[in-house]
């Protein structure tokens, strides 16, 4: 009886794990400059942006080379920019010589990252308001 329960739980767990993969939404992009996400600065390189569940506001940004990741709240129902459906891009604010992740807009993943405290402080200290978004094309998405 104990073995039967274990088998049923394992099959159920694997089934749920498999179904959760159906909701994964992933975008890849080659970012040619260092950039900040919330309070973390990330080096230039290839990144994936992923939302595990379609209804979740959490997005995971992962460096492909180092496999280091950061999670950020990026709701899809907020947008600062009007990008047509045929453009798959990652948008950044540029304040002075620093870049801040602002938004991901593709057919499979959309998410807006609110300005961080550092970004707001730099903008108010005389570096001026953020420039129009710096657009990096998304290489692939699934």
Image (cartoon, grey):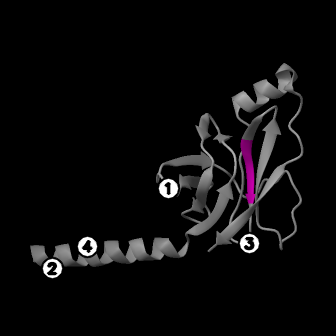
Query: Disc 4 versus disc 1: distance between alpha carbons?
Result: 35 Å
Q: In the rendered image, which quarter contains the N terminus?
A: bottom left
Q: Find numbered disc 2 in the image and state the secondary structure of the residue it sits on.
A: helix
Q: Which residue corresponds to mark 1?
A: 65
Sooner in the amino-acid sequence: mark 4 or mark 3: 4
Mark 1: few/some/many CA within 10 Å (<14, 14-19, 20+): few
Sooner in the amino-acid sequence: mark 4 or mark 2: 2
Query: Disc 3 versus disc 1: distance between alpha carbons?
Result: 25 Å
Query: Disc 2 versus disc 1: distance between alpha carbons?
Result: 42 Å
Q: Find numbered disc 3 in the image and state the secondary structure of the residue it sits on.
A: loop
Sooner in the amino-acid sequence: mark 2 or mark 1: 2
Residue 86 showing in the rendered view: yes
Q: For the point 55% across and 48% down, which residue is it?
A: 71
Q: Which residue corresponds to mark 2?
A: 4
Residue 86 appears at what percent x and percent y? Answer: 83, 74
Q: Which residue corresponds to mark 4?
A: 9
Mark 2: few/some/many CA within 10 Å (<14, 14-19, 20+): few
Q: Which mark, by number, is residue 107?
A: 3
In magenta, the rendered stretch is: 100-104
Q: In the rendered image, which quarter contains the C terminus?
A: bottom right
Mark 3: few/some/many CA within 10 Å (<14, 14-19, 20+): some
Q: Which mark, by number, is residue 77?
A: none
């Amino acid at each position: 009886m104990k073995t039967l329960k274990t088998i049923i739980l394992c099959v159920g767990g694997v089934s749920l794990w498999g179904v959760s993969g159906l909701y994964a939404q992933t975008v890849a992009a080659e970012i040619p400059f260092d950039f900040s996400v919330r309070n973390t600065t990330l080096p230039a390189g290839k990144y994936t942006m992923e939302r595990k569940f379609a209804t979740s506001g959490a997005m995971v940004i992962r460096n492909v080379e180092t496999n280091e990741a950061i999670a950020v709240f990026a709701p899809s129902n907020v947008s600062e920019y009007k990008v047509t459906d045929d453009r798959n891009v990652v948008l950044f604010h540029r304040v002075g010589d620093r870049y801040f992740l602002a938004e991901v807009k593709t057919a499979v993943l959309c998410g807006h990252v609110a300005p961080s405290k550092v970004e707001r402080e730099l903008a108010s200290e005389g570096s001026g308001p953020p420039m129009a978004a710096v657009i990096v094309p998304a290489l692939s998405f699934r």
